[in-house]
Image (spheres, rainbow, N blue to C red):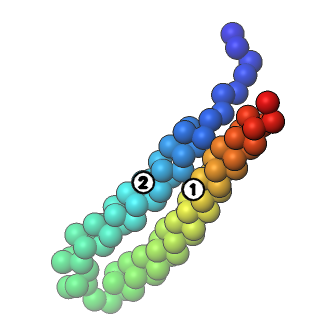
């Protein structure tokens, strides 16, 4: 069994891309759900509509928070990949 971690800029770039795609999918699912439910919620009135709008507001805020976190992670991982490549090239130049 090997006790090592393999790091490469291609892995990091792939991870950053996966994070971006996950964010896009999450937002797409939320938007699809809102659109699909709009037909039903348009006819709602009273406490059910108020409760739904309250939950939807909380959910939107949570989704927005997750989007921010995922975007930050994606950017950070991408930056790490770039730094890794730059460092490797600098080390290669020293030989």
Label 1 environment density (alpha carbons within 10 Å; few <14, some 14–19, many ≥20): many
Judged from this view, the residue extending furthest toward the top is 1
Picture quadrant of residue 45: bottom left
Picture quadrant of residue 30: bottom left
Residue drawn 25% across and 73% down?
Answer: 35
Evaluate if marks 1 and 2 touch, with contact meaning CB atoms under 8 Å apart.
no
Give coordinates of residue 80: x percent, y percent: 68, 50
User: Is residue 62 something that shows in the picture?
Assistant: no
The numbered mark at residue 61 is none
Give coordinates of residue 41: x percent, y percent: 25, 80
Q: In screen coordinates, is 35 left or right of 86? A: left
**Cα–Cα span, label 1 and label 2:** 10 Å
User: Is residue 91 something that shows in the picture?
Assistant: yes
The numbered mark at residue 74 is 1
Which of the two residues, 20 or 92, is positioned nearer the viewer here?
A: 92
Which of the two residues, 77 or 58, is positioned nearer the viewer here?
A: 77
Residue drawn 57% across and 56% down?
Answer: 74
Instruction: Please say if 54 is above or below 79.
Output: below
Residue at the disc numbered 2: 21
Which quadrant holds the N terminus? top right
């Amino acid at each position: 069994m090997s006790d090592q971690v393999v790091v490469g800029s291609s892995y990091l770039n792939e991870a950053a891309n996966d994070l971006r795609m996950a964010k896009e999918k999450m937002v797409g699912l939320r938007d699809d759900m809102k659109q699909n439910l709009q037909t039903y919620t348009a006819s709602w009135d009273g406490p059910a509509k108020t409760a739904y709008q309250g939950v939807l507001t909380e959910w939107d805020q949570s989704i927005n928070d997750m989007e921010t976190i995922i975007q930050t992670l994606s950017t950070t991982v991408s930056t790490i990949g770039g730094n890794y490549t730059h460092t490797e090239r600098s080390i290669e130049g020293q030989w």
